[in-house]
Amino acid sequence: MTAQEARETVVLAGRKLVESGLIARTWGNVSCRISDSHFVITPSGRDYLSLKPEEIVEVAVSDCSYNSSIKPSSEKGVHAEVYKQHPEINFVIHTHQEQASSVSALMLDTISVSQDFPSLGGKVLCAAYGLPGTKKLRRSVAEALSCSKGKAVIMKNHGAICFGTNYEEAFRVAHELENACKRFIQDQYAEISNKHATDISEILFFALSKLTGKVIPANAGAPLPAYESERTKSEKTESERTEYGFRPQIPDKRIADIHLEIYKKHKNINHIIHAGTPGIMAVSCSGIKLLPFLDDFAQIAGTSVKNVELNSYQITNALKSASAVLLQNNGALCCGNTKEDALAVGMVLEKNCKTLAVSALLGRVKPINWFECCLMRFVYMKKYSKLKIETKNRD
């Protein structure tokens, strides 16, 4: 494969990562070997849906050096370790897929998998935790790779690295890993509860009841209509404005007033989505304040997401330090500068809620260190603000 062909394949893979739900926003990365000494990889912080081949960066396997004005992914070192240890491997994807991420927070060193998943070699190793982009994370993955017989490694509290001889195999491995982790969770539930669950909500409510010591029925929620709104822009004519300063109009005045207060108090919020996915609904019914079990949650959503009553003061206050707020028995409001931002918040919130539940199921509830969460949130907010400025200047 030529370097240009590799760049084009990486662009296609980046789009597939987003469309398949294996990542949120720009979290995750893709690389392709172009020679014994070099590979190409996705850049840092770029939108995969608008990525161009000329933005894919060539990196040296030996020392991760590169000669480009575009910065490569911060996880280039992890990819380099795969290529160093596996000369037969030509394609690597780093995912933040839901089931594997849930398993990543269980503090396990390995999980056994059946022969139904041949690419995984009988068990999946879990690399020790390290902050994103650090040498510690790279060393942890390298150690796990040296002991693994499969083509995937779980990165604790982070995600997974999946690889293959080509693009197709790497994605096949990622889907095998997801199905294997899903079966692992279901088997653990069956062993603990003596029940077989086909509905994820059953597992979620059982696990959170186990954690809180009180029965949380699966129908505990009384979900409100899932209203979504966006702030009206100042350049719009008066006839296009709504009564409440956002659109579309919300017929429930109580909910409309809450959206209005959020827009009044938080100038950086331009879009609100009311999410009621299974994990979010289960945690909202538990009354638990949600802490980060996954890196991308700490970065995108915040160092904690409060669980409050349907009260505008409590909601706007909770959004001072987070991009989402759980509504008791009613899901969550996910907020962002754009609709895409709010959707990304919803994705990582749902994933972190499920991760909490899986951790509770096995009695292994241990959030990421608070200081490390604060550091990740700070770096993300600073980096994201800079990225918005750069994107605006390019446009």
Image (cartoon, helix red, strand yellow):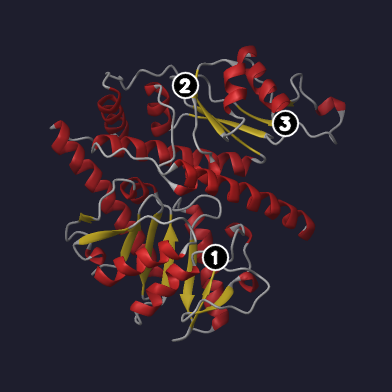
Relative height, residue 369 to residue 130 (above, below): above
Decide which of tag 3 and tag 2 comes sooner along the chain: 3
The part of the image, by quadrant, that contains residue 315 is top right
Q: Residue at x 22, y 47 (%)?
A: 184
Residue 8 screen position, x and y as percent: 56, 73
Q: Dot 1, how many residues are within 10 Å of its Cα: few (below 14), some (14-19), or many (20+)?
A: many
Residue 354 screen position, x and y as percent: 36, 38
Residue pointed to by mark 2 = 330
In terms of depth relative to the viewer, which is nearer, 234 or 63? 63
Decide which of tag 1 and tag 2 comes sooner along the chain: 1
Query: How far apart are labels 3 and 2 at the CA level?
Result: 22 Å
Residue farthest to the top, as pictured: 253
Q: Of the residues shown, which amino acid type is indicated by label 2?
A: Asn
Left or right: 7, with 173 as reference point = right
Residue 54 screen position, x and y as percent: 64, 73
The part of the image, by quadrant, that contains residue 264 is top right
Q: Of the residues shown, which amino acid type is indicated by label 1?
A: Ser
For residue 231, which numbered disc appears in the image?
3
Residue 60 screen position, x and y as percent: 51, 80
Query: How far apart are labels 1 and 3 at the CA level?
Result: 33 Å
Specify the quadrant that holds the C terminus: bottom right
Residue pointed to by mark 1 = 73
Left or right: 143, with 224 as reference point = left
Q: Is residue 189 visible?
A: yes
Q: Of the residues shown, which amino acid type is indicated by label 3?
A: Arg
Decide which of tag 1 and tag 3 comes sooner along the chain: 1
Q: Residue at x 40, y 73 (%)?
A: 81
